[in-house]
Amino acid sequence: MAAAGTLHDAFIDELRDAYDAEKQLIKALPKMAKAASSPALRAAFEGHLKETQGQVVRLEKAFASLDEKVRGKHCDGIEGIIEEGKSVMEEDFDDATMDACLIAGGQRAEHYEMAAYGSLIAWARAMGHTEAAGLLEQNLAEERAADKKLSALAEGGINRDAASQAHSNGDSEEAKPRTPKKKAASRR
Ligand code: ZN
Ligand code: FE
Ligand code: FE
């Protein structure tokens, strides 16, 4: 009978998952950059693409520090987030709304990565894998910064621009208050 897997085995598994997630994002980020209308948003995605390439290198160093072969294991979670992003990019939204949606999708990816790295770092520290923990912390810091940058872009004008076109048909609550009945009917 095989011995039960340990936290170390789970850690290596999750490291492979994170490695695969970063590789998937290296393919997705250029598409998000291309779909962005705001030059600042496009630059943010392109900048994070460069960082993501560096994150892959750090993960390779983490594998080496643990005497593990560099190997990915398909990350279903990030695949799902990327698939949702692709669906949004196929929509016929106005430019500012598309940018707002790209930010929302990008932030889903960042938060997923932040959660994954948070656990990986805690496990690495608990097992005394100091070098790997340090490398993972650098990746986490970049994910946090990317998330903050996306928030700043959204709050710095993109959401306002998108909202300004949201009720251009005079359908805003300010322009035409809805009766409770009509409001209920419009709910999906
Ligand atoms: Zn270990
Ligand atoms: Fe990443
Ligand atoms: Fe990221």
Image (cartoon, rainbow, N blue to C red):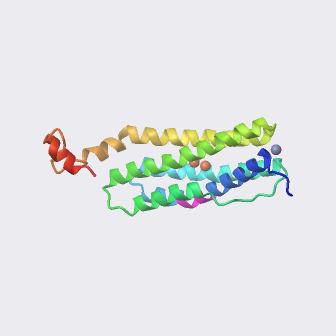
In the visual, does 7 lie left or right of 27? right
Q: Residue at x 80, y 38 (%)?
A: 127
User: Which one is nearer the viewer's eye here, 53 or 8?
Assistant: 8
Q: Which residue is rendered at x = 45% and y = 61% of the image?
A: 86
Q: Nearer the viewer, residue 75 or 143?
A: 75
Q: Nearer the viewer, residue 82 or 145?
A: 82
Farthest bottom residue?
Answer: 90
What is the span of residues highlighted in magenta in the rendered image? 23-28
On the picture, is 143 further left or further right than 162? right
* Residue under the image location 72 percent in, 42 percent down: 135
Residue 113 at x, y = what percent?
A: 59, 46
Q: Quadrant of residue 175?
A: top left
Most distant residue in the front direction: 1
In the depicted structure, whether residue 179 falls above or below residue 83: above
Q: Nearer the viewer, residue 90 or 156?
A: 90
Residue 41 placement (x, y as % from top left) = 44, 48
Q: State whether residue 120 appears in this view.
A: yes
Query: 137 left or right of 179?
Result: right
